[in-house]
Amino acid sequence: MEEQTTVLVVDDEKVIREGCTLLLQPEGYSVATAASGREALDLMRIQPVDVVLCDLKMPGMGALEVLEEAGRLHPDVPIIIITGHGTVTDAVDCMKKGAYDFVTKPFRADHLTLAVKRALEKQRLKRETRRLQEEQARNLYTLAMEQSRMHTIVNCMADGVLVTNRNLEVVLCNPTFMRLLGLSPAAPPPGPLAAYLDDESFLEALEDLAAAAEAEPARCLSQEICRGRVHLRAMTAPFFGPDMKMLGTVTIFHDVTAFKELDAMKNDFVQMVSHELRSPMTAIKLQHEVILQGLAGEVTDKQRQLLNRAQVKIQGLIDLVNESLDIARIEAGYRQLELLPLQIGEVLQEVADLLRVKAEEHKVYLQVSNSPDLPPVLADRRSMEEVFTNLVTNAINYSPDGGEIRVSAVSRGGYVEVQVSDSGIGIEPEEIPKIFDKFYRVKHPRTRQIIGTGLGLALVKGIVDAHRGTVEVESRLGEGSTFRVFLPQ
Amino acid sequence: MAAKYVLIVDDDPDLVETVSMILESKGYEVGKAYDGIEGEAAIKQRQPDALVLDVMMPRKNGYQLCKELKANKATRGIPVVLLTAVGEAVPTTSYSHAEGMAVEAEDFIPKPVDAATLVEAVERLL
């Protein structure tokens, strides 16, 4: 419920005060009265008043003085002058001084209530106007602050920012953009985009984006721009007005030069390591072979035995180098995966055929069973061979004599699931989270004899991840382990 | 019938020595050179029946030499097996696999190589 409206009646004649009170109270107003101008002003100081009815002529302080002082202290309280017939001209003077209206005595009830009602309406409008003015001032302030803040953010950004209008003319760019593109600061917007960035493929892509923006508002563009030594990654998105009309585009330029340089350095490093390690190992391996073949003279049985063992160690080192390089390549995303529809069952069969000799040496039984109508997976054949060679080799290495290894593939909910199960020594529960880490090898008295690089499972995980698949393991100590590889169909 | 003459070009003298011992044991006559320039000179002196060529070498690398041999009518017919430690393609380096393929060598063996593989490759070429 709205607060009650208070009307203050100021008149030195008690009859008028009471008459007004009698007229206004039934209309729902709360009525306060004052017998003099001074009393009225004192009352207005302590009590909120919405409208004042004030007699024109009172002893001491008249309506003019009340108007003057009330107008100063309470500018939005309308004052209605009560006047006799003879003093209408004075009442008009009061109007000029700011009174809202006047009623002449003797007044009719409806005249009085109408005047009060209109005065209140006017006051409401005045208050509303003031509220709107204040709100507008506040909005303008917020806008200015927002603008200034935005300006500072854009100018402080370490990435380049370029904003165009719908005609692809540059309307805003920050100092980083100018610096990255090597532009002089004397080229301030606006201007055609080509004057800032003469990269044709970038401009074309931007035009395409702008042309299709209203049909595909969520489309963004990611491009690489090379300017001499500087490599930039540019992300562009359109922006829209409230009616979803495209208003322009925003492009953020991120400097990836350092990354590119590091990348090139790493490539050189990989190549260097690759060459510097493999070359001497090749020589050592061949030297051993020459000696073992007796090309460098007679070899005793003991020498042969030592050399054979050295050969195994060298092969281990060679494997380590190869797998390290493979991991480096997969992590760097270099390993070119040729994703073609692949019958994983064939790969499993081939891997098993290749490893059957090794399985027999270890007196391990190796069995492959594929479900008959297995859908193809999109995968790189060589990588898949590597994954399953690793998993099956591990299974053989960690199986006891007479152990059994089952390899199987089934289709399950959009994935092909390959299982490699062994009846080997199993993995301790606390080791399981670590087995896919690089260079991690399970420490176990029975595994010390097994030569490995600690990279096999890391490689498996790297390859499977690169195929958007997953690999998981379940193991019971002393009973065996099951590795499951899920590959998307 | 005269023994086939195989030239081996590699900047690692140990490798050159062992490879020649292996090939000699199989009855080949073996020539040795220790970089691309030396290899080029050796070919001029006596044209080999097959060439075992390392890729990464000082002065002139194996790709370069192979390209030149294949571009020359007189030497185009020499079968070449490239030996490389670079292995798989590493993009942006000057020794990529793709480049290796582009030089038209007859065979391409990644290091480390064992004696049997090498002998097999040479036998295939002859």
Image (cartoon, rainbow, N blue to C red):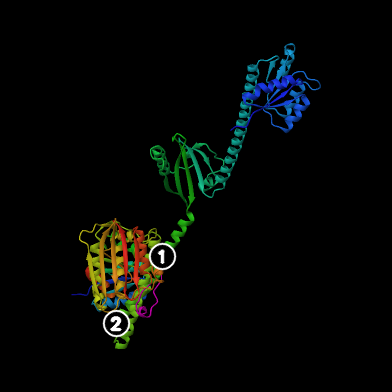
Name, please, the residue furthest toward the left.
B1
In the displayed structure, B58 sits above or below A287; it is above
Please report, as a chain letter, where disc 1 is located.
Answer: A
Write the start and end of the magenta stretch as one range.
A438-453
Picture quadrant of residue A54: top right
Q: Are marks 2 and 1 on the same chain?
A: yes
Please report, as a chain letter, where disc 2 is located.
Answer: A
Q: Badge 2: how crowded within 10 Å, few (<14), some, or many (20+)? A: some
- Judged left or right of residue A260, residue A315 is left
Q: Quadrant of the C terminus of chain A?
A: bottom left
Q: Main secondary structure of the magenta part?
A: loop
Q: Residue A68, how many percent across, how many down?
A: 75, 24
Q: Quadrant of the N terminus of chain A?
A: top right
* Of residues A267 and A487, the one drawn nearer to the viewer in this rendering: A487
Q: Residue A163, how many percent across, how many down?
A: 49, 40
Q: Residue A343, how many percent across, how many down?
A: 24, 60
In the displayed structure, A3 sits above or below B81; it is above
Whether residue A442 is visible here, answered yes or no, is yes
In the displayed structure, A348 sits above or below A222; it is below
Q: Badge 1: how crowded within 10 Å, few (<14), some, or many (20+)? A: some
Q: Which residue is mark 2?
A: A292
Which mark, residue A270?
1
* Residue A449, magenta (yes or no): yes
Point out the frontmost of discs 2 and 1.
Answer: 1
Residue at (66% x, 15% y) in the render: A108
At label 2, which amino acid type do we have?
Answer: Leu
